[in-house]
Image (cartoon, helix red, strand yellow):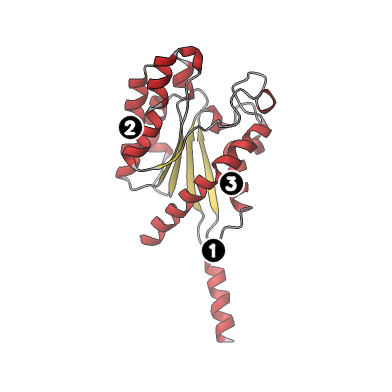
Amino acid sequence: MLLAGAAATGATAQTAAPPLRIVALGDSLVAGYGLPPGDSFPVRLEKALAANGRSGPRVEIVNAGVSGDTVTDGLARLDWAIGDDVDGVIVELGANDALRGIDPAVTRKALDAILKSLAARGLPVLLAGMQAPPNLGPEYKQAFDRIFPELAAAYDVLFFPFFLDGVAAERNLNQADGMHPNGKGVGVIVERILPKVEELVGRAAARRDAK
C-alpha cells in the first residue's frame, strides 16, 4: 500500500508539473499567415511533441511570430516576447531581411544581439536558419546564408540549417503566393525540425531541474 501510494503521488506530481514553455520567436512563418489557427507552426509542433511518446512535463509552444518582422524587429521586441517564465526559445527570423535585400551585416548584427541576450539569460536556443533566394545574386546569397551557421557555432546553440527545408519552391506545399507554407507544408516543416526541437526540450528540462 505504501509503495502504491508513493507511485500515485509521484504520478500526480508529474501531472501537476507546469509545462515547459518554449517560445517560437519569428515572422509570418511562425505566426501562421494565411492559415487556420490549428495549422500554425507552433500549434502543429506542440501536437507533434505530445504525440511523440516523450516522458516528462508537457511542452507548450508559445506563438511569438509577427508577420513582416525582420531580425531587427525581432530584437526590438525580444525583452517582452521572452518572459521570465520561458524555458527555451526557437528563433526563426530572416526571411523578410532576404526578401527586402537588407544588408547582411545589419541582419548579422541583430541576430548576434538576440543570441547574446538569450545566452546571458542562460536560455537554451534552437536557431532555424534561413536562405536568401538566388535572384539576389551569388555574393548577397553567400553573405546572407552563412550568417546562421556561423552564429549558431559562435553561441553553441542548436541549429536547423533551413526552416523551409523541403517546402521552399514546392508548389503543392505552399499557398498561392508561393512563399508561405500551406497546412501540408507546415506538416513537412514540423516533421523535419522535430528531432532538433526534442533536443531543445531536453536542454530546457535539464535547465529547469538544475534550478
The numbered mark, 3 or 2, whose residue comes first in the sequence reads 3
Q: Quadrant of the N terminus?
A: bottom right
Q: Secondary structure at mark 3?
A: helix
Amino acid, disc 1: Ala
Tell which of 5 and 55 is nearer to you: 55
Q: Would residue 112 be visible to someone looking at this image?
A: yes
Residue at 43% from the left image edge and 50% from the top image edge: 87
Disc 1: which residue: 16
Q: Would residue 117 be visible to someone looking at this image?
A: no
- Outermost residue on the front side: it is 138
Q: Residues within 10 Å of mark 1 (few under 14, many from 20)?
A: few
Residue at 43% from the left image edge and 15% from the top image edge: 138
The numbered mark, 3 or 1, whose residue comes first in the sequence reads 1
The numbered mark, 2 or 1, whose residue comes first in the sequence reads 1
As measured in the structure, the alpha-carbon distance from the residue carrying label 3 to the one carrying label 2 is 27 Å
Disc 2: which residue: 112
Task: Using the rendered view, name the quadrant where residue 177 is placed.
Answer: top right
Amino acid, disc 2: Asp
Relative to 18, is 138 above or below? above
Disc 3: which residue: 46
Q: Position of residue 120 (x, y in %)?
A: 29, 44
Mark 3 or 1: the one toward you:
3
As measured in the structure, the alpha-carbon distance from the residue carrying label 2 to the one carrying label 1 is 37 Å
Question: Is 36 left or right of 41, judged from the image as shown?
Answer: right
Q: Secondary structure at mark 2?
A: helix
As measured in the structure, the alpha-carbon distance from the residue carrying label 3 to the one carrying label 1 is 18 Å
